[in-house]
Amino acid sequence: QVQLVESGGGLVQAGDSLRLSCLASGRTFSTYAMGWFRQAPGKEREFVAYIGLSGPSTLYGDSVKGRFTISRDNARNTVYLQMNSLKPEDTAVYYCAAYTRSGSLRAAREYDYWGQGTQVTVSS
């Protein structure tokens, strides 16, 4: 089992950048592929990015491809989400989670051990 704590959210203007962090507790972090999701008010949870166990394997949601970068540092038990060229439509609560099943990498149901989320607000 792993516990996840997100940080790094805030209020920024369109075009700005933010880096989110997700710190994992426990010694098993390196055995989990990880993902970032986001949820805006009144909307379903949306897949943002996925990273494999050691990093080279990544996948992005269509709405963030080319602007966001996911990375991980297994020595620090941390996964990051670098967000550039932010847009108002990126406003949401961002969550990290561990990929624990075998289905679609984009499906929230395939992930467990969700963090509490960090709010990102992008003003126009």
Image (tube, rainbow, N blue to C red):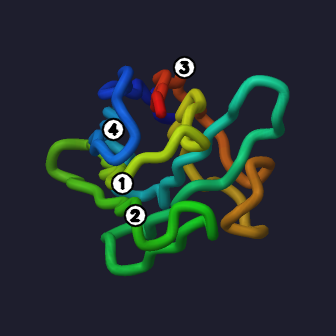
Mark 2: few/some/many CA within 10 Å (<14, 14-19, 20+): few
> Circle 4 sits in a helix, a strand or a loop, which is it?
strand
In this orientation, does residue 24 appear? no
124 on left or right of 103:
left
Which of the marked residues, 1 or 2, is nearer the chain's N terminus? Answer: 2
Mark 3: few/some/many CA within 10 Å (<14, 14-19, 20+): some
Residue type, numbered disc 1: Ser
Relative to 5, residue 64 above or below: below
Q: Which residue is mark 2?
A: 67
Q: Residue at x 17, y 43 (%)?
A: 76
Which of the marked residues, 3 or 2, is nearer the chain's N terminus? Answer: 2
The picture quadrant where one finds residue 40 is top right
Q: Which residue is mark 1?
A: 85
Asked whether the residues under the numbered discs 3 and 1 touch, taking CB atoms below 8 Å apart as contact, a structural biologist would say: no
Residue type, numbered disc 4: Leu
Residue extending furthest bottom?
Answer: 56
> Circle 1 sits in a helix, a strand or a loop, which is it?
loop
Q: Which residue is mark 4?
A: 20
> Circle 2 sits in a helix, a strand or a loop, which is it?
loop
Asked whether the residues under the numbered discs 1 and 2 touch, taking CB atoms below 8 Å apart as contact, a structural biologist would say: yes
Q: CA distance from mark 4 to mark 1?
A: 14 Å
Residue type, numbered disc 2: Arg
22 on left or right of 44:
left
Badge nearest the viewer, 4 or 1: 1
Q: CA distance from mark 3 to mark 1?
A: 25 Å
Which of the marked residues, 3 or 1, is nearer the chain's N terminus? Answer: 1
Q: Which mark is residue 116?
A: 3
The image position of residue 111, as x and y in percent, is 67, 48
112 on left or right of 96:
right
